[in-house]
Amino acid sequence: MRIIENSKIWFSISSLIILAGLVSLICWGLNWGIDFKGGSLVEYQVKNLKFEEIKDIISSTISDATISKTKKDSILIKSSTLEKKPFEELKRKLKEKNAKVEEIRFETVGPAISKILIRKAIWALLLVSFFIILYIAWAFRSVPKGISSWKMGFSAIIALVHDVLVVIGLFSILGHFSNIEIDSYFITALLTIIGFSVYDTIVVFDRIRENLKYSNQPFPSLVNKSIMQVITRSLNTSFTTLLVLFALFLFGISTIKYFALALIIGFIAGTYSSIFIASPILVIWSSKK
Amino acid sequence: MRKNLWITIFLILLGVILAGLIDWPKGPDIDFTLFGKRFYKELKLHQGLDLQGGTHLFFEADLSKISPSEINSALEGVKMVISRRIDALGVAEPVIQVVSKKGLIVELPGIKDVDKAIELIGQTAQLEFREAILDKSIDKNNNIISFNYDDWKDIGLTGANFKKATVIINPSTQKPEIAIEFDKKGGDIFKEVTSRNIGKPLAIFLDKKILSAPTVQTAITEGKGVITGDFSLDQAKKLEIQLNAGALPVPIKLIEQRNIGPSLGKESVQKSLIAGLIGLLLVAIFMIGYFRFLGFVADVVLLIYALIVLALFKLIPVTLTLAGIGGFILSIGMAVDANILIFERIREELKRGKSLASAIESGFTNAWNSIRDGSISSLITCLILWKFGASLIKGFALTLGLGILVSLLCSMIITKTFLKISIGTCFAKLIEKSK
C-alpha cells in the first residue's frame, strides 16, 4: 500500500470530515448539557399515570421544561430553573393524581461551575500538548540523519488536534440531529482520546526511528515501510479496544453510553491519524528543509 | 537461568493468590502487628456517589469581605464547622473538600433527607446575645418596641462563647428549649450583663434574626442559661447541632446539587459490570482466535492483571465511580495492546527464521521502546488530568493511570516469564505454530 504517496487522498478525507464538523459548529454550535450551561435535570419514576397526562402536568408547572421518556415509567425533565420549589410543586401535583413518584436523580448546576470546568479542561488540553511535545522531542532525541525530533513532536500534536476536531465536529452534528449533549463525561472522553492518539502515533514513530538505524532507504519509502510493519498491530489494538467500547455503548447505562460513543469515534480517528496524517506530515515537513 | 524463572513463577503465583484473597467479596481485613506497630485496614471496594446513591453539593463561599491572604484559612474554618455538623448527622464516609478560592464540595453517600442536610449545612448559625437600648429597642417601661438587629447593642457574647448546647424539654410547657453552658469568658460577660439588666429583656439573634427576647429575672452567675423560642423539636435539634459545631466564618450558598437515588446506582453497577464482562470476553476470544496459544497466554495474564488492579483498588483505596470504571475498562485495552505489540514482534522474528528463544528475547526488547514511550505519554496525560481535572475526571485518571502501570508490569514480567518457561516444553511447538 502506498500510504505516503497518496497523502493527498488521506488529507482530503480528513479535511472533509473536519470541514463538515466546523460548518456544523458555526451553524449550530454545541449542544451543551447542564454541566456547562447551568440548569436542572431531574429523573422521576412515575407509576399509575399515563405519559401524556404527566407531560401536561409538567408543562403547566415548569414552563421551559423539556420532557423525555427514558425507559418504562421513567421521565427525564430538563429546565433552566435552579430552584427546587417548582419540582416540589410538581411532585405534589402528580401525587394528587394518585401517581407513585420516586426521585431517581435530581441535579442542579449553577452557571459558575461550568466556567471552572471549561477553564480547567482547556488548561489540561494545553498542558498535555505541551508536555507531550517535550517528551517526544526528548525520547526521540537520538533519531539519526537530521530528522528533527521536534518535528516528530509537532506532527504528533497535529494528529492529536485532528482527532479532537473530528470528535468535537461529529458531536456538534450529533447534538443537532440526535440531541446528544456535551457533558463532563465528554470532556473526559476528549482528554482520553488525546492520550491514546499520541500513544498510537508514538508506536509508528518508534518503528521509523528503529528503521532509520539500519536502513539507507530514502525517508518517504522508509516511513511507508514502517507503517506497513505496524499496521496490523494498530488495527488489532484498535479492534480489541473498540470491542470493549462497543460493549459499553450497547449495554452500558445512558450516562456512560455517549462517553463510549465519543471514545469510539476518537479511537477510530486516532488510529487513522497516526497512520494517514502524522507520518505523511512528518515526511512532507522533513523534505522541505 | 531456569531456576530463576521458577522462582519468578512462584512469586507470581503468590501475588495472584494474595490479590485473589483481597478481591474476595468478604475477604479478610489486614490486621497484624509488626515490631510493635499494628497495621489495620478494612478491605472493601469504595463506591462513589453515582454507584451507591447520595448527594453531591457545591457550596460557594461569599469571600467578598475577606482579605485575600485570609481566604484559605476562612475556607478551612468553614470546612471544620461543616465536618462537625455532618458528623452530628451520622453520614458514613462523607467527603468535604475545599475548592481553592471558591468554596467547598460536600458529598454525602446514601443520605435520605437531602433538603434537611442542606439546610443544616448551609446556615451560618451565628448566635448572638444583645443588650437593649432605651428608646431604640425598648421604651421606658421595658416594653420591646423593635426586634430590629441594629436596634440592639453588641455585648460580645456569641455562640463562640458556648461550651455546650443541649436540647431539653421544658417540663411545664412541654416545649423544647436549648440549655447552654458558657465558657469562662462567656460566663463572665453573661454575669455582668444579667446583673445590670434585671427586669429588662435580653435579645437572642440567630443570623441577625430574632429568636427570642426573654426578660432577665435575676443575675445569672453560674454561667448557664436557657434559650426559649417558638421552635419545633426538629428545629431545636438542628440548632443544637449548629451551636455545638460553631458558626460558619463566612456565609455559603448552594450552587450545585446532584442527587442520585440508590436504584439508579445499583442499575449502573449492574449494567457496567455486564458491559465490561461482555467486552472482556470478546477480547479474550479475539486474542485466542488471532494469536492462538500466545493469545491464550495473554488472556491468562489479562485475568491476573484484572485481579491485581482490583486488589489495588481495595488497598489504596480508590473510590470507584462510573468514570473510574470507564478508566479501568480502557486500561484493559492498553494491557492487551502491550501484548499485541510483543506478539507481533515475536512473530516477525520467527518468520525471519530465528529460534524461539531468541525470537522471544528480541520480541520483548524491540517492543519495549514503543510500550515505554506510549505508556509514559499516557501517564503524562493521566497526571495532568488528575492534577487539573474536576473530581469526576480525577477518578478516571487515577484508575487509568494505575491500570497502565500494572499493565506494564504484567506484560514485561508475567507474560515474559510464561513464554520463557515454555521454551523446551510441549508448549514451545504451540507458540511456534501460532506465527
Image (tube, rainbow, N blue to C red):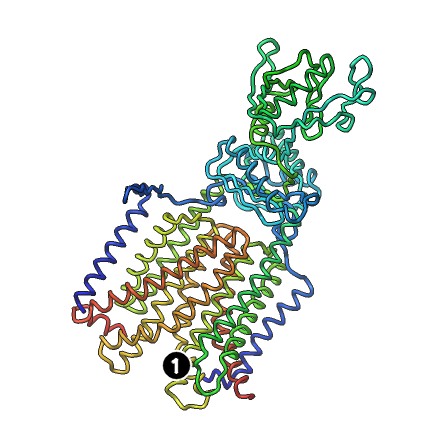
Q: Is residue A74 visible?
A: no
Q: Is residue B362 above or below residue B415?
A: below
Residue B125, quarter of picture: top right
Give percent across and percent down for residue A166.
57, 68
Q: Residue at x 25, y 82 (%)?
A: B353
In the figure, B72 relative to B413: above or below?
above
Q: Is residue B77 left or right of residue A226?
A: right
In this picture, residue B19 sits left or right of residue A29:
left
In the rendered structure, the answer to whether residue B14 lies left or right of residue A235 reads: left
Number of callouts in the render? 1
Q: Residues within 10 Å of mark 1 (few under 14, many from 20)?
A: some
Answer above or below: position of B374 versus A75: below
Q: Residue at x 78, y 26 (%)?
A: B151
Q: Position of residue A46 (x, y in %)?
A: 56, 37
Which residue is located at x 56 percent, y 70 percent?
A161
Q: Position of residue B15 (x, y in %)?
A: 27, 54
Viewer-side residue, B340 vs A60: B340
| Residue A19, position as x, y percentages in the image | 63, 72
Q: Name the residue carrying label 1.
A: A210
